[in-house]
Image (spheres, helix red, strand yellow):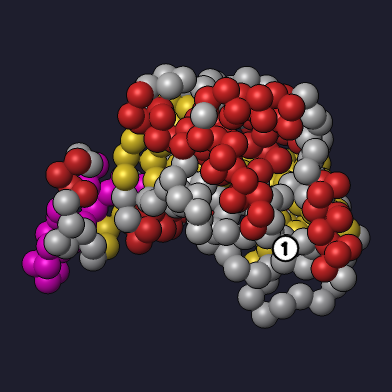
Amino acid sequence: MARILSLAEAVKSAVHDGDTVAMEGFTHLIPHAAGHEIIRQGRKHLTLIRMTPDLIYDQLIGMGCVDKLVFSWGGNPGVGSLHRFRDAVENGWPHKLGIEEHSHAAMANAYEAGAAGLPCAIFRGYIGTDLPKVNPNIKRVKCPFTGEELAAIPAHRPDVAIIHAQRADKAGNIMLEGVLGVQKEAVLAAKRSIVTVEEIVDDFGPRSLNAVILPSWTIGYVAEVPGGAFPSYAQGYYPRNNAFYKEWDNIARERDSFLAWMKTNVLEKSPGAFAAHARKMRTAAE
């Protein structure tokens, strides 16, 4: 059953050195505040999984928290490269980074398989691509019924899944609305989970037709962190801060400017430090 804790307590309890951690959110509801708390607590030797690693993974990599990345497409959406990611791969700074690259479809299927308790995902894919040449975890198997050759990859079974959602109730049930990625599957595939939320409410009230409810028995820890997805967006709370994504390109391009920004804006600030920005954006939107 879910335990409602502070973000610092939840990360201390759930995330350990050497863990495999999935932090999911597809443009929407990306758990930035949780990633910052992992950095503040100095976690090391993590393997990160994510369908589309962007700014928060760039920050975790640049701060030396990560040994390996399992991913599909990594970049600063609409802007360009992730400079800390590239520096780690190309130059080994702050240390060498192992990578395992997949397609989006493969990542989604691997989460589905993990959520189902299966050892691998089997699907149609990787036909006419060179990824199998550089990723030994992409295999081919023959269907025992039709003889068709299919792709197979290991299921994702992270030690910890971390997501952001709009609301939790006081029992620890979670509601997500709007554009979703594989948040539900990541939580169900993981051994432990943390969900940061905009607010804890007595009742969810009216909900949209695409709302997803994760019952409390599927959740490990819940932390109320207003603005916890900023600078990504949380439908109904604040929009995406496109300006910050553009600014990040210059911030992260050089090691010194990156470290200075992280020191000022993450290491020396409390959990949810971006919440004030998010609240201002919500007020402006209204």
Q: Picture coordinates of residue 37 (x, y %)?
A: 69, 31
Residue 284: quadrant of the picture: bottom right
Which quadrant, please, contains the C terminus?
bottom right
Q: Residue at x 77, y 24 (%)?
A: 268
Per the image, the residue denoted by label 1 is 239
Judging depth in this view, the residue of 9 and 89 nearest the camera is: 89
Q: Residue at x 82, y 68 (%)?
A: 285
Q: Residue furthest left?
A: 147
Which quadrant, please, contains the N terminus?
top right
> Does 153 sit left or right of 146 as displayed?
right
Q: Is residue 152 magenta?
A: yes
Q: Residue furthest bottom?
A: 209
Residue count near mark 1 (Cα–Cα under 10 Å), binned few <14, some 14–19, many ≥20:
some
Image: magenta residue range: 137-156
> Does 223 sit left or right of 99 as displayed?
right
Residue 185, can we see it? no
Residue 51, can we see it? yes
Mark 1: which amino acid?
Answer: Pro
Height in image: 269 above or below 203?
Answer: above
Q: Picture coordinates of residue 40 (x, y %)?
A: 69, 24
